[in-house]
Structure formats: C-alpha cells, structure tokens
Amino acid sequence: MLIAPSILSADFGRLNEEIDELNKTDCDYIHIDVMDGHFVPNLTFGKCIVEAVAKRSKKPLDIHLMVKNIDFFIKMMIEVKPYSISFHIEEEKHINKMIHQIKDNDIKAGIALNPHTSQNSLEYILRYIDFVLLMSVNPGFGGQNFISSTLEKAIRLKEMIKDNNLNCKISMDGGVNSQNINLLKESDVDIAISGNYIFKSKNYQEAINLLR
Ligand code: DX5
Ligand code: ZN
C-alpha cells in the first residue's frame, strides 16, 4: 500500500523542516488539504504555501480540494504542477469538465467522497478518473476517529472497478493509523493517507514502517 502523510497535522511554524523530514522517509506522496472555509469549516493553504511546499518537497504532491469554487481552485493549483488533484463530488455539477481540466495538464484526477456519499454516484465517472478518495472522517480537521463504514464502501467500489476492468485506485483519508490500516489492506485500498498518526510520532519513518 502506498503511504501519503497529510501535512494538515504538521507544525506550520516549521513547515520547511517538516517537509525535509518527510523527504528523508520513503513515503510515496505528500497529501495537501486545501480548505476554503465554505465547503468545510476550516481554512488551510493557498497557492503561496502550496508553492513553497512544492519547492521544498522531493515527493510528488497530492492535492485534496475541500472547496466550493472547484473551478477556481483547480486553475490555481494546476500551476503548482502537483502529481494529483482531487475534488468533492458533493460540490460539483460539471464533473467531466473539471476532470478534463486536471488531466489536460498531465495531472492525475481524483474524485473525493464524503463518508455519507455512496460509491454508486461514481457509476458514470469512474472510467474517466485515476483515483477515488474515500473520506473516512468528515472533512475539515485532522485527528478525528475513523468511520468504519468506509471500509464496506471501499470493497464495493473495488468490485465496480474490477467489474469494469478499470485502472482506478482507491485512497482512504482520515483517522488512519497502525491499529486500523490492516482493515484498509483487507478492503483492497491502494493508498493510505495519514496525518495525526505520522506527525504526532517522534520518528516519521518508524511510523510509516508500522503502517506498511
Ligand atoms: C481531513 C483531511 C485529511 C486529514 C487526515 O479533512 O482531508 O487529509 O488531514 O488526517 P488524520 O489522519 O489526522 O485524520
Ligand atoms: Zn485530505
């Protein structure tokens, strides 16, 4: 399973050092939660900070948009040239247009689902995207408890992916730690995103080793 630390749980006063620490680990991506204070009751990173992270990071960036004005934020973030961008299906009517906007810039495109949103909402979208991000907490904050019904959703989603012979990955985001990651593995999740568990540990590589 691929591991993506979420820098929402990093010490923002020492952001460069935190990125350097992640560069020293074998993590696969750095997950960046962009929140606008409207889609979720929290505000995080704008373009300046994401650019600073991109400059310092040796890891590919995975940008998770938790925003209302998706078109505006996609246009902003493609300039940073991340590895991937995901946005929430709950907030967008013109899904295909947004996906193309991301993919036309050689960036992997993902759709994020809140815990209550069914995998069935992806039936006519799955074939166009590179990954689905399943939120296993309500979006907005790090350090919340894992919502276990997301595992059932991952299993059903994997069936849809296999039945249609698609090459679409599943990532799971929220409350992931060394105690529950085996459940993600059993549910055939491809990418584990983890914030608090990694950043609250003394040694990030050891925490990642325990997740692996
Ligand atoms: C929540 C974010 C997650 C969060 C994960 O809104 O999308 O990426 O940072 O952090 P933990 O692992 O602490 O739940
Ligand atoms: Zn996230």
Image (spheres, rainbow, N blue to C red):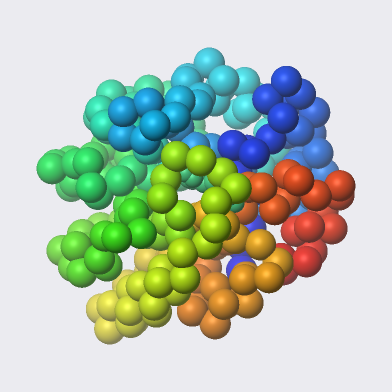
Answer with left or right where residue 77 lies relative to residue 48.
left
Residue 154 placement (x, y as % from top left): 40, 73
Which quadrant holds residue 113? bottom left
Residue depicted at 55% across the width and 73% down the height: 184
Which quadrant holds residue 97? top left
Residue depicted at 63% across the width and 58% down the height: 3
In the figure, 136 relative to 52: above or below? below
> Which of the image's four quarters has the C terminus?
bottom right
Residue 115 placement (x, y as % from top left): 36, 59
Answer with left or right where residue 19 lies relative to residue 82.
right
Residue lying furthest front: 145
In the figure, 34 relative to 123: above or below? above
Residue depicted at 51% across the width and 24% down the height: 45
In the figure, 92 relative to 149: above or below? above
Residue depicted at 42% across the width and 45% down the height: 139
Tell me if I can see residue 176 in this picture.
yes
Answer with left or right where residue 61 lies relative to residue 108.
right
> Which of the image's four quarters has the N terminus?
bottom right
Answer with left or right where residue 211 lies relative to residue 47.
right
